Amino acid sequence: TSQDGGDVYLEEQIYTVGSVPITLYAVWERKTALITFDYNGGSGEIQSKAYGQGLNTLLPSATEANAHRDYYSFIGWATSPVVESFRLRSGGEIYYPDTEFFVETPLTLYAIWQRNQTVITFDANGGSGGLAEVSYDQGETVVLPSGRSAPTREYYTFLGWQTESNGGTQYLIDSDYFTDTESAVTLYAIWQRNQSTITFNYGLGSGTVKSLTYNEGDS
C-alpha cells in the first residue's frame, strides 16, 4: 500500500475495496541465479550460492571458500575448466580475486589453480660451476643435477647432494628427490677426495712397503 512497504497483497489474494481511493504499488522480488563452484581437482566449503540477477558481486575468495589443493595456490574462478597456463578449454572468462562478476543466469564456475614452485639453490660446497638454482614443481619426484650440470672440484669426485654442508640427508647421483611444500631449499655438493696409489719396485733389492695410497693434491 506504499512504495516503501505497508500492507502486501500477494497474487490472487482477496483485496476488499473501501470507500476511499487508494494507490497500490507493485511488489518486486529480484530473481536469483544459482552459481555452482567446481573446485577442479581441489576442495572447498562453498558448493553453490544464490546471487541476485543483474547485479555485480564478488566471488568467494580462497579464504572464504577454504579452497585447498595440495601443492597448488588458488588464483580465482573461470567460466570453463582451465588446462595449463590459464588457458580455457572452451573459451570463457577468468575472474581474479577482488574483481566483480555480473550475475545473469545459473552457471558453474571452475577454480583456477597455479602449481607452487620450490626453488632449489645448489651450493658447490668448495667446488665451482654447475647449476646455481632450479625451480621445480612442488609435489614432484625429480632427479637432481649431475654430469655436465654438476659442479667440479680439483682432486675430488662429485657424489651427489646433501641437505647440510657437512652432512644431513644425502641424495646420491641418480637418486630421487621429492619436492615438498618448501618454497626455497639449499642443497650442498658431496665430495669424495680422489686418491692415487704409488707402487714401489725395488728392482734387484727388496723392501717391506709395496705401495702407498695418497690423497691427490697433497704434498
Image (cartoon, rainbow, N blue to C red):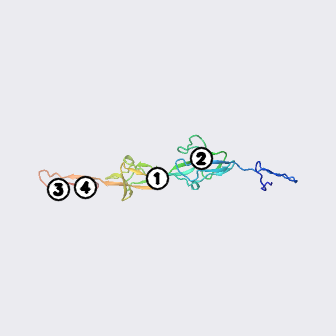
From the top left corner, tell me how far across and down residue 2 is, in percent. Answer: 80, 55
Q: Earlier in the sequence, mark 2 or mark 4?
A: 2
Quarter of the picture containing the C terminus is: bottom left
Checking the image for residue 109, the label placed there is 2
**Left or right position of 5 against 32:** right
Quarter of the picture containing the N terminus is: bottom right
Read off the residue under disc 4. 214
Read off the residue under disc 3. 209
Q: Nearer the viewer, residue 190 or 102?
A: 102
Residue type beneath disc 1: Val
Residue type beneath disc 4: Tyr
Q: Secondary structure at mark 2?
A: strand
Residue type beneath disc 3: Val
From the top left corner, tell me how far across and down residue 203 is, in percent. Answer: 13, 50
Can you tell which quarter of the image residue 124 is in? bottom left
Mark 4 Cα-neighbour bin, 10 Å: few <14, some 14–19, many ≥20: few
Q: Secondary structure at mark 3?
A: loop
Read off the residue under disc 1. 119
Q: Earlier in the sequence, mark 2 or mark 3?
A: 2
Q: Secondary structure at mark 4?
A: strand
Please tell me which residue is depicted at 34% across the width and 54% down the height of the picture.
191
**Left or right position of 212 against 178:** left
Q: CA distance from mark 2 to mark 4?
A: 69 Å
- Residue at the extreme left: 204
Residue type beneath disc 2: Leu
Q: CA distance from mark 1 to mark 4?
A: 39 Å
Please tell me which residue is depicted at 22% across the width and 52% down the height of the picture.
198
Please tell me which residue is depicted at 64% across the width and 50% down the height of the picture.
50
Q: Nearer the viewer, residue 205 or 195?
A: 195
